[in-house]
Image: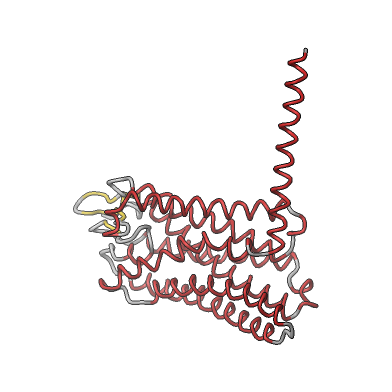
Amino acid sequence: MQTDAFEKRENGTYVTEFILLGLGKLEDFSMLLFLVFLMIYTLTLTGNVLIIVLIVSEQNLHTPMYYFLANLSCLEVCYSSTILPKMIADFLSDSKSISVWGCFMQLFCFGCLVIVECYLLSVMSYDRFVAICKPLYYSMIMNNRVICICIASSWLCAALILVIIICLVAKLSFCGPKKIDHFFCDFSPLLQLSCTDTSHVRLLALIFGSIDILPPFILTIASYVCIIIAILRIPSTTGRQKAFATCSSHLIVVTIFYGTLMIVYILPDTGTLRDVKKVFSIPYTILTPMINPLVYTLRNQEVKKSLKKALSNFIYFNEKKICNIWVISEHNFKL
């Protein structure tokens, strides 16, 4: 008899864990990979947390664009923390196992955050379109109510979709082998371990994926096309160059994220393409959370000014504190 949905039988025993095969042949350089991905994770956390702290603490950054950026940075922290800690630990481990509950939870968090990022990138591109192409209506279109609705609806829609998919995946029977050919619990490699029909789950995931990825992608591209057309109308050459520098960097990040995401989930899941898809999973799961702070905020003049101000205040506070300690110590010595 079939018991708990999260504990499937394998050769008469309960399957309580899966084995993550990681990066395949590259696992021979486990110590080097450990150091590289540890550095990436550290930079990702440092950059995104710094952006969140700056936006929360600086009053001049309390605008719609920076609210979206703070939410994106928060998302990137959660996004990278869903995959990288386990991946980094596996480089130093021989078992590389993950519990069935942990696998489903990682799949839920990862899928939810990917969908939210798709929505957020499209809303942020639309925000820039309104700011550049309709500046007189910006405060009316992008007000606090609209921001809250966009952010809340993104998270709610993503969570609802992933709850449905995880419930369907949990009802499948997994009968071995229990090795996931990936560095995290991704949807397609997990379904390959099922010994029951997965066509209904794949079809529903394809429908949800088309709804979640294509419309935001089209909105993002359409917004940037309109922005580029508006930039070309700027009479000043310097103004056009500055606008293009910012717009092009944003567009590069969006292209990398959506491009690799579509390659991984649209290409057929054959043996020859499996390693290719695994490599293309790295940019949108690991690299974009690290470079987003650099592209979206640290190249921004307002953020640079706020960062310099915060560093100056920090240095001044520490110097003042050291001076006070020195004066107190000197006074006690005289006594």
Say if residue 152 shows up in the picture.
no
- Which residue corresponds to the image point at 48% horizontal and 57% vertical from the top-left? 109
Q: Is residue 1 left or right of residue 236?
A: left
Q: Residue at x 74, y 54 (%)?
A: 58
Report x, y in % for residue 136.
Answer: 80, 78
The residue sitting at the top extreme is 335
Which image quarter: residue 203? bottom left
Which quarter of the figure has residue 10? bottom left
Colour pattern: secondary structure
Which of 226/122 is in front?
Answer: 226
The residue lying toward the viewer, choosing from 113 and 167, is 113
Is residue 201 in view?
A: yes
Report the residue at 45% width, 76% height from top: 207
Image quarter where the C terminus lies is top right
Question: In the current view of this chain or complex, which residue is farthest to the left?
Answer: 11
Q: Quadrant of the N terminus?
A: bottom left
Q: What is the count of numbered marks? A: 0
Q: Is residue 251 left or right of residue 102?
A: right
**Percent x, y for residue 249?**
57, 72
Camera-nearest residue between 295 and 169: 295
Image location (x, y in percent) of residue 193: 28, 62
Percent from the top left, x then y, of residue 309?
73, 51
Q: Is residue 87 above or below residue 237?
A: above
In the rendered view, tell whether residue 260 sits above or below residue 163.
Answer: below
Report the residue at 63% width, 72% height from top.
Answer: 246
